[in-house]
Image: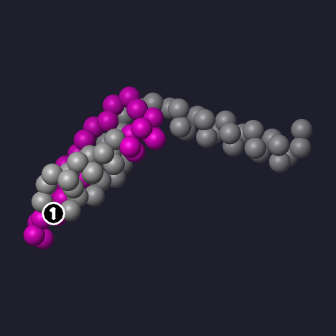
Amino acid sequence: MKASSLITVFGILALATVTSCKKDYTCTCTTVVSAVSTDYKHDIHNSNYADAKKSCQNYEDQANSGLPGGTTCHL
């Protein structure tokens, strides 16, 4: 097997391992209203990284649609 093919196979396996691993994540959000900053956290249980990232983005979207000020969230 050529080295480039071997690297491709290992890359695909590594990507599949990272994206399919389920674990707990914490989404940390910061809301700023009139120069006052408030942090809060959401626990996301038994999720892969991609789904946890989507959930965290949903928390940010919901906060920005319903609360005054601006909210940013990240894993």
SS at badge 1: loop
Is residue 46 a member of the stretch shown in magenta? yes
Q: Give the extent of the magenta segment.
A: 29-54
| Location of residue 42 in the rendering, given as x and y in whole percent from the top left corner | 25, 41
The residue sitting at the bottom extreme is 35
- Overall secondary structure of the magenta stretch? strand
Q: Amino acid at mark 1?
A: Gly
Answer few, some or many: residues within 10 Å of disc 1's Cα (few below 14, many 20 plus, some between 14 and 19). some
Residue at figure coordinates x 69%, y 43% from the top left: 11
Query: In the displayed structure, does residue 32 sit left or right of residue 17?
Result: left
Which residue, given by chain and number where applicable, does mark 1 sit on?
69
Residue 57 against residue 69 in the figure, above or below: above
| Location of residue 31 in the rendering, given as x and y in whole percent from the top left corner | 18, 59
Is there any visible trace of residue 10 in the rendered image? yes
The residue sitting at the right extreme is 1
Residue at figure coordinates x 67%, y 36% from the top left: 13
Residue 51 against residue 72 in the figure, above or below: above
Query: In the displayed structure, does residue 2 sit left or right of residue 67?
Result: right
| Location of residue 64 in the rendering, given as x and y in whole percent from the top left corner | 21, 55
Residue at figure coordinates x 27%, y 51% from the top left: 61
Is there any visible trace of residue 37 in the rendered image? no
Instruction: Pick the quarter of the image with the N terminus.
Output: top right
Residue at figure coordinates x 63%, y 39% from the top left: 14
- Say how many tags the image has: 1
Q: What is the quadrant of residue 37 in the picture?
A: bottom left
Q: Nearer the viewer, residue 25 or 52?
A: 52
Q: What is the quadrant of residue 8 in the picture?
A: top right
Is residue 25 a member of the stretch shown in magenta? no
Residue 72 against residue 45 in the figure, above or below: below
